[in-house]
Image (spheres, coloured by chain):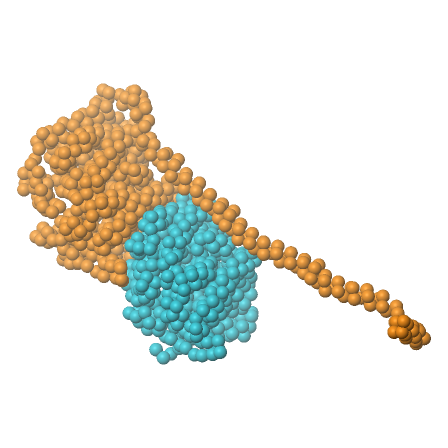
């Protein structure tokens, strides 16, 4: 099967084409085709996973694409354990999202189109996962960007949705500039963009470290855009304007996962280049902290989750920057499941309550037992409570940071863990417990249909169990499968586990006191730390900062250049034209009055003379005879005098 | 191939023009279908040309040569290689589609189609003439119908635009003529055969090369148009009727870059190296400048017009690189831009025919009303901004790789040019959003979806955009040998 793994990616593409060309009017057929495709991909991915378990590979299949002197750009498929795991994650989450969407998008006039876009999105992400060259990765990378643009702006009649799609596309495109530049540098230095060849060259020190550092950091810029890391994180929270299943897909298994995946793929560079490693680690760490801090005070259920994603991605990037290949990708996997669950749960809540604002919710647990229970499970998992998935992957991350000796970053990561537990349970308590704060909306709320709750239950199981493959006492299952160079099994550090648990429980307890027991008044707290609260509530004013600087500059500069174009360049062209015209007129005048004047003047003078001379032409013979006589007399006089 | 296919390609449209002129001027439908028929035959011939072309060699193929004015060494000399075949194909396809797109012309139908066919004669001729005299004739033949097509069937400022276009291009071609005459007298025995003049390029002195290259360059640069010779373009494009804009952007602009590749670089290799940086710099400026100015446009058609300036900048950057990849990127971009921008102009025309305005701000949310049109427009918009899987990406990537690896131009030029990628995304998405997305502007309640004929004109272009983007190999194989040959002549 493994040599045909491109089929996994192409099935959703086929589904897209089928829906666009044949089933664009039929809801049943569209969803049926899309779900069949993604489920088949899932089954095939499972087969591939087993094959890779038997033989780690990497399995590489190359296809010629562009070949000319000085430019060899093949496409290739590269299946290693990481790719196999990612294939599973993407197809599982995508399948859940597909099925869930039947219920969520029910009644939407563009229902078939939605499923076609979901298929396209899944195709792009699967293509990215199996790509074996940085070039192919870039291709699918951009396609992921396109499809997220289409899906975020799916309800494009809403201006905010259309804006959010555009913002996502352009912001990530800025990161892609780095990616592109990185590709160029890498190609110039290595003459190839194949993973395998480049890894080989790096291992044999064929590429200077300075170039690797530059290439690594530039490629990472792409990840900064896609995985919404500081300073390009601003698009992700806005991307909440898309339909909620899309948010789940973007936040869990596709789009943002792509950045982490790429960072894992440049692990060979990170290992050699100190500067790249440090840059990546610190960007990840800072992002984790910043996003978590914003998440503490947001009131939109999806926005809290969005910042949570940014923060968790920061974790993964931080781990990868510390060389924690296994830890970072492990967390990518566990996070995919519980974050998909959280988003789908949030979607279920929004579907029922018709609002995103958690201040208008409350007490929904009674109305929505399945949603609330699964949501609590996911929250416990992301908070890192033993023995759920999140606990194990978070612990791996702590360990890998510790091994690199970045104590500062480790403390930061632990603080973020506490904040994560706090904001997640703030969300849970405000949404599901206490008295309903909006009676009317509460009355309307109801549990979602089965197509929506079954995926929740399924994902909840994964949110609990998926991490168990990485339990250190069970032969380090995950670490023995997905690793860089050699399997690495750090000893379990019970101290770290304990600290992590205390911090998480502390965070939950604080949220419990503030939002369940109400023994600490959150409003009073907000008022007390007004400065910080405003700062966080406004998301550190990043949007305003970019609006006021970069975007303003671009709008100003485009006007300046356009005026220059019209006022200077085109003016000059017209000036030359007018000068030509002026010249023409001038010479015409000259022609009329001077040259032609001269000609006419000659005529006039002649006529004038002629007029004078005419007078002596009398025609009378006697006059002529007289003149002749006079002439003869004068002649004789001169001759003989 | 013994069949003189190139001659047929040149003279079939001429025959078509004569036939059209003989028809009754009231028989509009007959005139339309007759012209479409003749251009379709040319299109079929161009397909045959592609099918019979051997891309593995840089040799000129389909060569036809006959004495014409022996006393001056002028010959009727035609031929095609990897540089001209894609352009001939593009010309054949776009001419046919444009003629179909012109079926809605109702004013002076007979003259319109006659001029259009004459235009095709000139275009096909330029791309296969190998004798300077012949080349120059076709070059000028093209100008005249273009002048009338803009000047008679154009928009409100048509006279201004037509004259500006005509004089500007004429200015350029006069410089080119000076260059041709200089070459003629410089060589001994005198010849006007382009391949022979290339073969003798080692005879030209350095200064001579620099000067004559510059003369040719300005002539071609005006056509491309290279910044700062570009201001005729927005005026001409905006005033021209839809199909003429398609031809202008799709084919005429490429003659500039074609001339550079066919004539300037192989004939003046040392000058090519000398001017590498200026050429690349002009490309860089065009990319960035064109993108910014596009963003500032309020008129949809003008936006597309300025985007051409930006996109053709990639061609110049690729040429300046003097690498096979750069040249191939340029060639790809010529083809890709012809397809993409041709389609963009067709689409803008479709909208204008219905809405009678092109002001971006006047629209809004019409994506909900005409989803098919919107989908197609976004497809070409994505192609234009270089989305992988579509043709624009391949050309941009090749240009960047070719330029980055070049030893003739500085890296920073490429780095700055890369910014164009984001700026392009910016203006395309901004335009898409303001026209198609957001709340629906109820003024467009009666807007209708594209009709069959309109779809017929853009679907082939969509297919090509996707095909080249997904599977560039056929085009790569077609052009590589010829381009590699040119690059090797220049860089030794």
Identify the residue shown where x is 12% and y is 36%: A403
- Residue at the limit of the structure toward the front, as seen here: A641
| In this view, B189 is above or below A603 | below
Give the residue at x 5% y 42%. A475
Residue B21 visible: yes
Which image quadrant for residue B94? bottom left
Looking at the colours in the rendered structure, which chain would you say is drawn in cyan?
Answer: B
The chain letter corresponding to orange is: A
Residue B450 place in picture, x, y as percent: 42, 57
Residue found at the far right of this picture:
A622
Depth order, front residue of A294/B321: B321
Q: Nearer the viewer, residue A199 or A589?
A: A589
| Residue A566, placed above or below residue A445 | below
Residue A391 appears left or right of A567: left
Task: Indicate whether B332 appears above or below A264.
Answer: below
Q: In the figure, is residue A392 to the left or right of B95?
A: left
Vertically, is B347 above or below B81? above
């Amino acid at each position: 099967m493994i040599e045909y793994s491109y089929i996994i990616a192409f099935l959703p593409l086929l589904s897209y084409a089928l829906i666009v060309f044949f089933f664009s009017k039929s809801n049943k057929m569209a969803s049926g085709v899309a779900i069949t495709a993604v489920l088949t991909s899932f089954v095939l991915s499972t087969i591939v996973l087993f094959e890779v378990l038997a033989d780690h590979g990497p399995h590489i299949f190359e296809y010629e694409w562009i070949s000319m002197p000085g430019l060899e750009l093949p496409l290739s498929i590269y299946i290693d354990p990481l790719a196999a795991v990612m294939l599973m994650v993407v197809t599982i989450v995508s399948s859940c999202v597909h099925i869930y969407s039947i219920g969520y998008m029910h009644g939407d006039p563009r229902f078939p189109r939605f499923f076609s876009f979901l298929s396209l999105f899944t195709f792009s992400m699967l293509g990215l996962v199996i790509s074996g060259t940085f070039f192919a990765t870039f291709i699918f990378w951009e396609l992921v960007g396109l499809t997220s643009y289409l899906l975020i702006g799916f309800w494009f009649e809403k201006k905010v949705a259309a804006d959010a799609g555009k913002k996502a596309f352009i912001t990530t495109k800025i990161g892609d500039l780095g990616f592109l530049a990185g590709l160029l540098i890498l190609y110039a230095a290595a003459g190839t963009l194949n993973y395998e060849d480049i890894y080989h060259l790096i291992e044999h020190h064929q590429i200077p470290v300075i170039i690797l550092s530059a290439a690594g950091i530039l490629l990472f810029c792409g990840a900064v855009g896609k995985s919404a890391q500081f300073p390009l994180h601003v698009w992700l929270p806005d991307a909440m304007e898309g339909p909620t299943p899309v948010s789940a897909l973007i936040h869990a298994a596709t789009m943002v996962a792509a950045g982490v995946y790429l960072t894992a793929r440049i692990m060979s560079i990170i290992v050699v280049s100190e500067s790249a490693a440090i840059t990546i680690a610190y960007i990840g760490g800072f992002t984790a902290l910043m996003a978590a801090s914003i998440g503490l005070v947001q009131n939109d259920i999806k926005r809290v989750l969005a910042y949570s994603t940014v923060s968790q991605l920061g974790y993964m990037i931080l781990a990868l920057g510390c060389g924690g290949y296994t830890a970072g990708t492990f967390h990518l996997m566990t996070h995919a499941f519980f974050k998909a669950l959280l988003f789908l749960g949030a979607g279920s809540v929004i579907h029922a309550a018709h609002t995103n604002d958690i201040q208008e919710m409350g007490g929904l647990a009674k109305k929505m037992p399945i949603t609330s229970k699964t949501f609590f499970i996911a929250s416990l998992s992301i908070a890192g409570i033993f023995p759920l998935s999140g606990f194990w992957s978070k612990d791996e991350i702590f360990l890998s940071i510790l091994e690199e000796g970045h104590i500062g970053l480790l403390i930061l990561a632990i603080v973020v863990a506490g904040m994560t537990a706090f904001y997640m349970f703030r969300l849970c308590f405000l949404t599901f417990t206490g008295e309903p704060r909006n009676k009317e909306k509460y009355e309307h709320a109801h549990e979602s249909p089965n197509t929506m709750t079954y995926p929740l239950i399924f994902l909840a199981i994964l949110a609990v169990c998926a991490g168990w493959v990485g339990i250190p006492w069970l032969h380090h299952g995950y670490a023995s499968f997905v690793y860089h160079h050699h399997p690495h099994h750090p000893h379990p550090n019970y101290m770290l586990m304990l600290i992590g648990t205390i911090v998480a429980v502390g965070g939950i307890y604080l949220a419990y006191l503030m939002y369940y027991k109400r023994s600490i008044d959150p409003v009073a707290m907000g008022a007390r730390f007004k400065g910080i609260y405003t700062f966080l509530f406004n998301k550190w004013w990043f949007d305003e900062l970019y609006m006021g600087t970069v975007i303003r500059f671009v709008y100003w500069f485009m006007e300046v250049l356009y005026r220059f174009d019209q006022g200077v360049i085109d003016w000059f062209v017209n000036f030359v034209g007018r000068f030509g015209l002026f010249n023409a007129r001038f010479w015409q005048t000259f022609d009329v009055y001077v040259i032609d004047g001269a000609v006419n003047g000659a005529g006039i003078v002649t006529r004038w003379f002629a007029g004078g001379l005419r007078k002596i032409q009398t025609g009378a013979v006697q006059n002529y005879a007289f003149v002749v006589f006079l002439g003869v007399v004068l002649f004789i006089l001169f001759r003989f005098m | 191939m013994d069949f003189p296919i190139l001659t047929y390609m040149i003279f079939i449209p001429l025959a078509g023009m004569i036939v059209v002129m003989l028809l009754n001027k009231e028989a509009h439908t007959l005139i339309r279908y007759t012209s479409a028929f003749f251009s379709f035959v040319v299109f079929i011939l161009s397909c045959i040309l592609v099918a019979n072309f051997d891309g593995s060699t840089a040799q000129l193929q389909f060569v036809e040569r006959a004495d014409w004015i022996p006393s001056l060494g002028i010959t009727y000399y035609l031929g095609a290689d990897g540089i001209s075949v894609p352009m001939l194909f593009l010309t054949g396809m776009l001419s046919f589609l444009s003629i179909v797109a012109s079926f809605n012309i109702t004013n002076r139908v007979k003259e319109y189609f006659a001029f259009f066919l004459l235009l095709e004669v000139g275009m096909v001729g330029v791309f296969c003439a190998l004798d300077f005299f012949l080349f120059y004739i076709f070059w000028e033949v093209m100008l005249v119908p273009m002048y009338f097509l803009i000047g008679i069937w154009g928009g409100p400022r048509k006279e201004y635009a037509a004259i500006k276009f005509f004089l500007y291009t004429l200015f350029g071609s006069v410089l080119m003529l000076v260059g041709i005459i200089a070459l003629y007298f410089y060589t001994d025995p005198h010849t006007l055969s382009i391949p022979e003049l290339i073969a003798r390029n080692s005879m030209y002195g350095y200064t001579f090369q620099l000067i004559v290259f510059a003369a040719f360059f300005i002539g071609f640069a005006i056509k491309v148009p290279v910044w700062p010779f570009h201001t005729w373009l927005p005026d001409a494009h905006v005033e021209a009727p839809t199909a003429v804009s398609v031809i202008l952007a799709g084919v005429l602009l490429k003659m500039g870059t074609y001339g550079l590749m066919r004539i300037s670089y192989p004939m003046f290799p040392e000058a090519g190296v000398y001017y590498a940086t200026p050429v690349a710099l002009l490309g860089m400026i065009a990319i960035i400048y064109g993108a910014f100015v596009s963003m500032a446009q309020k008129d949809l058609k003008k936006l597309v017009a300025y985007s051409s300036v930006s996109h053709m900048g990639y061609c110049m950057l690729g040429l300046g690189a003097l690498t096979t990849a750069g040249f191939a990127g340029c060639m790809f971009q010529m083809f890709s831009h012809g397809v993409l921008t041709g389609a963009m102009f067709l689409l803008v025309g479709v909208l204008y025919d219905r809405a009678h305005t092109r002001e971006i701000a006047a629209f809004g949310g019409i994506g909900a009303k005409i989803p098919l049109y919107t989908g197609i427009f976004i497809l070409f918009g994505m192609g234009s901004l270089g989305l992988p899987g579509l043709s624009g990406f391949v050309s941009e990537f090749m240009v960047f790789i070719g330029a980055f690896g070049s030893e003739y131009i500085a890296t920073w030029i490429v780095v700055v040019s890369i910014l164009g990628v984001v700026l392009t995304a910016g203006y395309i998405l901004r335009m898409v959003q303001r026209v198609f997305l957001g709340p629906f502007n109820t003024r467009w309640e009666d807007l209708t979806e594209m009709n069959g004929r309109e779809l017929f004109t853009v679907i082939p272009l969509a297919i090509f955009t996707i095909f080249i983007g997904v599977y560039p190999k056929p085009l790569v194989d077609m052009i590589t040998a010829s381009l590699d040959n040119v690059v090797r002549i220049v860089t030794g």
